[in-house]
Image (cartoon, rainbow, N blue to C red):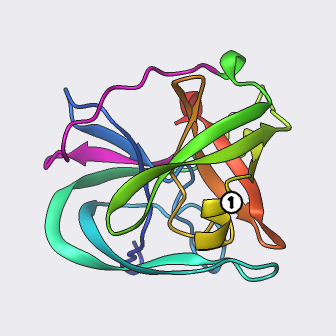
Amino acid sequence: LRDGAAGLGTVTFIDPETGLFGGLGHGICDADSGEVISMESGEVCGVILGGIHKGESGKPGELCGILTDRDLGDLTVNCECGVFGIITDLPGTAEAIPIGRREEVSEGEATIISTLKNGKTAEYKIEIYEIDRDSDGSKSFRIRVTDETLKALTGGIVRGMSGSPIIQNGKLIGAVTHVLVNDPTTGYGIFIENM
């Protein structure tokens, strides 16, 4: 990088056999040009979540936290469809979730998995609509937060939730990527195949 960069984002998936991970669902971009930053190297570290700035119309919210010194792995790729690398310090085991292909994604109910407070992961209800089956980028379909608990906590989608896995019919079908600035309850998701 021309300058160092650091921020909070969500890991979407980890392959426990290889340690390969993917996150964000969109690239880390230059603040001035909006272009995906060419990256030489990076590292993954833990975070202690400290609070939430709620999103509201015209003002996106964000998860607030402190990056820890704990080195969890290496970041090797930054591209339009996310960040990728190897996790060397695997978190506790979780049950594997099968992948859902783009043709299996349907309009209607789904959930996102996100860690918002106290390091506890929870599922929140969303609705999927306007699916672009030909998408090869980070805006494959639209999502709307329908979960009242999530709306009360965050106002909807906030910075730091990018990469939150989207589950439909028991399958990992994508990840949260963007929020609409004028309506924090709506945003975009990426097909997991694109990641």
Q: Is residue 91 above or below residue 30?
A: above
Using the rendered view, name the quadrant where residue 50 is placed.
bottom left
Q: Which residue is mark 1?
A: 148
Using the rendered view, name the quadrant where residue 13 is placed.
top left
- Please state if 109 lies on the left or on the right of 150 as rendered: right
Q: Is residue 186 above or below residue 34?
A: above
Q: Is residue 93 magenta?
A: yes
Residue 55 at what x, y percent from top left? 68, 77
Query: What's under tag 1, amino acid-wise?
Result: Glu
- Please state if 19 lies on the left or on the right of 8 as rendered: left
The segment highlighted magenta reads 82-101
Residue lying at 31% horizontally and 50% vertically, measured from the top left: 76
Residue 135 at what x, y percent from top left? 74, 33
Residue lying at 56% horizontally and 60% vertically, measured from the top left: 36
Q: What type of secondary structure mainly makes up the magenta span?
A: loop
Mark 1: secondary structure: helix
Q: Is residue 87 magenta?
A: yes
So how many labels did they put on this image? 1
